[in-house]
Image: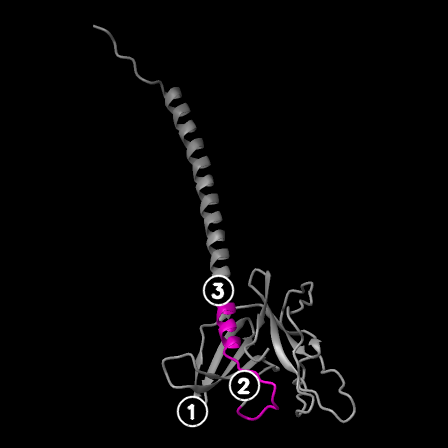
Amino acid sequence: MKQQQGFTLLEVLIALGIVSVISILSWQGLEEVLRSAGRVTQVDEQIQTVNAVFTQLEKDLEGLELKLEAPTPESDLIEVTGNGLLIQLTQRNTSEPAYRERIEWVLDNTQLLRIARRELNPELPSISEPIPTLGMQIRLLREPGGWGSPIVFGNHAVQERNDLELQGPALQVNTNATPTAPPSGEGGTPPAAPQGQNVLTLVRAVEVSITQPNRQAVTRVLLTGGVY
C-alpha cells in the first residue's frame, strides 16, 4: 500500500506568501483606480456646474432689450455693482404674461448665487442652489468706449486677458441722448463727446471669469440682447 504524499509546511507558507503579495498589489491597484475615478467624477461635476452657470447667464443676457434711446426707469439695464452683476429686464419668452425681473449674480464668500426678484413680488426672491466658487471677475464691453477695467470678487485666479473685438460695423450711437455713465466701481468711462453733444453708450458684451474650487478659472464672453 502506497503512502500518500501531501504539501509540506514550507510549501504551504510559500504559497500563502505569494497569494498575500498578489492580493496587496491588486488592492493597491484597485485603490488607485477608485481614486482616479473619483477625480474624474469631481472634475466632470465641476465642468457641468460651470457650464450650467454660463448657460443660465447667457439666457439672462439674451433677455435684455437694450436700446439706443435715453434710458428710463422701465428700461432694461446691466451693470456691475459692489456685490456682482445686476441685470434688469422684462421676461417675455415664458408661458406667463410678460413681467419685470431683477436678477443678481452675487458671490457670497465662496458661494455663487443667482437671486431673481419679480417686480410684483420682490420680497419673495428665487435663489439658486449655492455654487462653490472661489472668485469671479467681470468686465463690460461698451460701445463706444471699449472694454472697461475688470472688477474682481473674492479670491479670483489671475488670468491673461485678451480684448476680443466684436465682428461687424461699429454701433451708431445717438449723440443727442442723455449720457449714461458707467456705474460706480465698474471701470472704464465713455469717450469724451464733442462740445455741446452727449454720447449714449451701450453694453454689447460681458466677460465673466469664474474660479472653481480647484483654483482653475473658466472665462466666457457673452453678448447682450439689444439693438446692434
Instruction: Classify residue 98 by image quadrant.
Output: bottom left
The C terminus, quarter of image: bottom right
Which is more toward the observer, 133 or 76?
76
Q: What residue type is labelled 2?
A: Asp
Q: What residue type is labelled 3?
A: Thr
Q: Is residue 148 visible?
A: no
Residue 142, percent across and down? Answer: 66, 78
Residue bearing mark 3: 49
Q: Residue at x 69, y 67 (%)?
A: 163
Q: Are marks 2 and 3 in contact (CB under 8 Å)?
A: no
Instruction: Classify residue 194 by image quadrant.
Output: bottom right
Furthest toward the right, the residue is 195
For the record, the magenta segment spans 51-74
Q: Earlier in the sequence, mark 2 or mark 3?
A: 3
Q: Is mark 2 on a helix, strand or loop?
A: loop
Which is more toward the observer, 134 or 117?
117
Residue bearing mark 1: 120
Q: What element carries label 1?
A: loop
How many C-alpha atoms fall within 10 Å of the one at disc 3: few (<14), some, or many (≥20)? some
- Asked if residue 144 is positioned above or below residue 179 in the image, the reply reads above
Q: Earlier in the sequence, mark 1 or mark 3?
A: 3
Number of marks in the rendered image: 3
Furthest toward the top, the residue is 1
Q: What element carries label 3?
A: helix
Residue 53, percent across and down? Answer: 50, 69
Q: What residue type is labelled 1?
A: Leu
Q: From mark 1 to mark 2, how far is it between C-alphas?
A: 16 Å
Residue bearing mark 2: 76
Q: From mark 1 to mark 3, how far is it between C-alphas?
A: 30 Å
**Magenta region includes residue 70:** yes
